[in-house]
Each structure stands twice: as C-alpha cells, then as structure tokens.
Image (cartoon, rainbow, N blue to C red):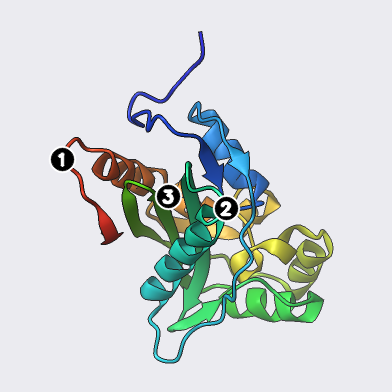
Amino acid sequence: MTWRHPFLADPRRPIVLASSSPRRSDILHAQGLHFAVQPAHIDEQVLVGEEPGAHVERLALEKARAVALNHPEALVLGFDTIVVIDGDILGKPEGREHAIAMLTRLSGQMHVVHSSVALVCDAGELAGQSTTEVRFRSLDPAEIAAYVDSGEPMDKAGAWGIQGTGAMLVQHLSGGYFTVMGLPLGRMRELWARLFAPSSSARGRS
C-alpha cells in the first residue's frame, strides 16, 4: 500500500518542488508525497524597505510562480528561509569569511528563522510563513572555523543548519523544528487545506 499523508488532500494533479534542497525533498517524501524537482532561479535581493516576513513570503511565491510557467498542470511548491538578527536578514554566505562573520555575529545571541511556503496551481495561489526563535551557545572561534570548513554552512541561510552538526550550536529554540529546517510543515498543511477546500477561490497571501 502506498502511504499518503491523511491531512494533505490529493489535488489530483502532479506536484513539482521548486527547490533543489535535499532536506526539503526528504521531508516531503516522509509525508508520502511524490513529486518532480525543478529549482527556480530568481533574484533574491531584498527590496528597499521590505520587511523580513514579506521578503521570505515573496521569494517563495516568486519561485513557485516561475516554475509554474513550465508546469501549468501541476501544483508547484515554493519555499524560502532566512535568518534575521537585530532586524538584519542573513541569507546564504558568499564565502568562507562571510560564513565565519555570520556565525560570529550569531554566537551567544538570539535570532529568528523565517521559513515560507507557497502553493501555486490553476486552483489559485497561497503563501504563508512560520517563525522560530533560536539562541546559540557562545561559540569559540576555532569551533566556528571548523564548522565552516566542514562545508555544511555554505548553502544555508545564516550559515548553519539544524539537521547536521550545526545542531550542536543551538542552546535553545522556541517554535517549529521544521521551520528551522526550511519547510514549515504545519503551515504548508494549512494552506494546502485552504487551497483545495471545496468552496475555495484562494489567491494571494494567507
């Protein structure tokens, strides 16, 4: 028998993941979903005056829309994740020194992880987000350098990931674990249910 998550209604259409993240693929596979992968390539610069929440939702929606142009018959799932500290958005590091600088700034501090999800198909489109507060231990410079040199931080917002050895950087978190991993499952389930509700005419942000 093929497993299908009981809370994700079958949309009767193929699913496309607009992300190359193996972590997101693993999470979706664990929910019993079958999908194709087509990464989206968009400009991820922060717009002037754009708040972190609005930024991360916009990127998820733009990624899903970009891929949906080539898959009009599919439900396209877009995601984005950012780290925010003192109001500043930290994306993926541009190199080793940038990653070290990010982790040094996060050391011993509280920051917020924003992860967004967007669903786009012929039935409409919805986007939403989830946030989790994370506090790091005070990190030794040698520990930071060793972690960066492992290569794990280089494709992750804020230069760290909770699903690997980066979990040892965390002292405390308040919120969803999957939000920190970059795929807010609870939020996705809510939007999925709304989009495919019998009387739904969903469009836009939640």
Q: Are marks 3 and 2 in contact (CB under 8 Å)?
A: no
Q: Earlier in the sequence, mark 1 or mark 2?
A: 2
Disc 1 residue type (three-letter): Ser
Residue 166: image quadrant is bottom right
Return the residue found at the far bottom: 48
Measured Cα–Cα span from mark 1 to mark 3: 25 Å
User: Residue 123, how many percent across, how many down?
Assistant: 32, 46
User: Residue 134, how many percent across, how many down?
Assistant: 47, 63
Judging by the rendered image, the residue that carries numbered circle 3 is 184
Q: Name the foreground residue: 76 vs 72.
A: 72
Judging by the rendered image, the residue that carries numbered circle 1 is 199
What is the count of numbered marks? Answer: 3
Measured Cα–Cα span from mark 3 to mark 2: 25 Å
**Residue 205 in view:** no
Q: Name the foreground residue: 153 vs 136.
A: 153
- SS at badge 2: loop
